[in-house]
Image (cartoon, coloured by chain):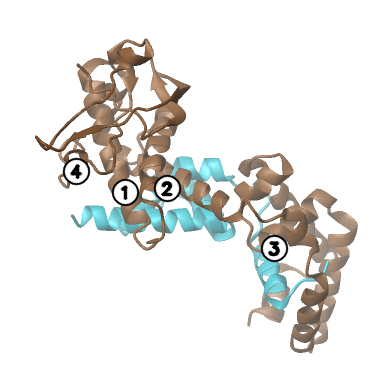
Chain colours: A brown, B cyan
């Protein structure tokens, strides 16, 4: 029987069922670690959820269960791109095996990526590997085979994990507060810096022109997104607070940059002029 | 809207890099694996991937993800 591996403890979340992403609420299910025999066995099976065993692909085990730690060997990840696609898009044990190998690879990749973040909860990487696995399967039709499959998969996993990390770190920061608060202090700092910055009149003119374009030609939404981004708020959080998505925020700030560029050029400040005034 | 010195410099740098046509973060993600492999192999990237290089220069988040990917690939390939 397929070891229907379910999320730790009482959790709900995404699972892959019959090739589709579904949210299941799961309670009281965990990997059983049998202390006496030092063997693991699944504490629940797919039938517990009224699903056919072969249709659930979820491979998480309780973190204290060392028997299911990812193997250090990369056996199973040396498939060709075509073999990966065939296995993942197929069914049965080949798909099961490929998913398991891919999940192990993603765990290794994410552990490497976040090796410096010692404060991360042990479950974070596991959660992100699982989330990434689902995202990869959703995007599988978009894989063009221009890189190794695992490189493509790792890029997606890193996007998933870093986006989540940024979301968590910034979720309690109000975009309004970031844009509006501390203006006095910032103005003070700005004024002090301005003494050095604006000593050259050309710099002063460029900055004034830039402010004019910001005030006169950018929309309020563009101003807020641009300022929040300049102050370090990640796009994913700007998007959340503005009710948008990362791509749309990128387009919003890109349009703002284009307007600023055109405004500066219209005033006679081409990129090379600005470069010479500020960065040489 | 008061900007600090660093914010003014950062914004002017971004304005200087701005192109009329830029790929977005999703398109970057689609191609960044190929870009990373070519860069790590020391190959000159194909013309079609120059847009990825440009996006990485203007998008701090995609750049952070790309650097993590290179780090991961380097370490996993090294065993």
Secondary structure of residue under mark 3: helix
Q: For mark 3, does the 10 Å Cα neighbourhood hold few (<14), some (14 to 19), or many (20 or more) residues?
A: many
* Protein chain holding label 3: B
Residue A224, quarter of picture:
bottom right
Q: Are marks 3 and 1 on the same chain?
A: no
Circle 2 sits on which residue? A158
Residue at the spot 29% in from the left edge and 22% down from the top edge: A44
Circle 1 sits on which residue? A109
> Are the residues flagged by discs 3 and 2 in contact, CB closer than 8 Å?
no
Secondary structure of residue under mark 1: helix
Circle 4 sits on which residue? A66
- Distance in Å between CA atoms under marks 4 and 1: 19 Å
Q: For mark 2, does the 10 Å Cα neighbourhood hold few (<14), some (14 to 19), or many (20 or more) residues?
A: many
Nearer the camera: disc 3 or disc 4 = 4
Q: Is residue A87 left or right of residue A51?
A: left
Could you say which is closer to the camera, residue A84 or residue A241? A241
Could you tell which of marks 2 and 4 lies nearer the N-terminus? Answer: 4
Secondary structure of residue under mark 4: helix
* Protein chain holding label 1: A
């Amino acid at each position: 029987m397929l070891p229907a591996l379910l999320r730790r403890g009482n959790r709900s979340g995404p699972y892959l069922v019959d090739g589709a992403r579904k949210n299941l609420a799961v309670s009281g299910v965990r990997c059983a670690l049998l202390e006496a025999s030092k063997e693991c066995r699944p504490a629940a099976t797919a039938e517990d959820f009224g699903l056919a065993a072969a249709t659930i692909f979820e491979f998480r085990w309780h973190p204290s269960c060392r028997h299911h730690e990812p193997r250090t060997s990369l056996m199973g990840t040396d498939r060709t791109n075509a073999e990966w696609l065939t296995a993942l898009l197929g069914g049965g044990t080949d798909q099961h095996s490929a998913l398991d190998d891919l999940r192990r690879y993603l765990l290794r990749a994410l552990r490497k990526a976040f090796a410096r973040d010692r404060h991360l909860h042990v479950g974070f990487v596991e959660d992100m590997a699982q989330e990434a696995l689902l995202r990869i399967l959703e995007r599988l039709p978009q894989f063009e085979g221009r890189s190794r499959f695992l490189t493509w998969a790792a890029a997606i996993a890193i996007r998933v994990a870093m986006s989540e990390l940024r979301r968590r770190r910034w979720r309690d920061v109000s975009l309004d507060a970031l844009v509006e608060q501390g203006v006095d202090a910032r103005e003070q700092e700005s004024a002090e810096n301005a003494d050095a910055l604006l000593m050259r009149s050309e710099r002063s003119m460029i900055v004034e022109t830039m402010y004019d374009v910001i005030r006169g030609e950018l929309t309020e939404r563009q101003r807020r997104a641009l300022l929040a981004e300049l102050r370090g708020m990640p796009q994913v959080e700007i998007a959340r607070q503005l009710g948008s998505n990362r791509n749309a925020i990128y387009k919003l700030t890109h349009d703002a940059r284009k307007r600023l560029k055109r405004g500066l050029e219209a005033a006679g400040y081409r990129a090379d002029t600005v470069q010479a005034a500020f960065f040489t | 809207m008061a900007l600090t010195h660093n914010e003014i410099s950062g914004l002017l740098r971004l304005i200087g890099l701005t192109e009329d046509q830029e790929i977005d973060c999703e398109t970057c993600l689609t191609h960044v694996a190929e870009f990373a492999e070519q860069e790590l192999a020391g190959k000159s990237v194909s013309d079609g991937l120059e847009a990825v290089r440009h996006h990485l220069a203007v998008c701090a988040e995609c750049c952070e993800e790309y650097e993590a990917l290179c780090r991961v690939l380097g370490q996993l390939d090294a065993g």
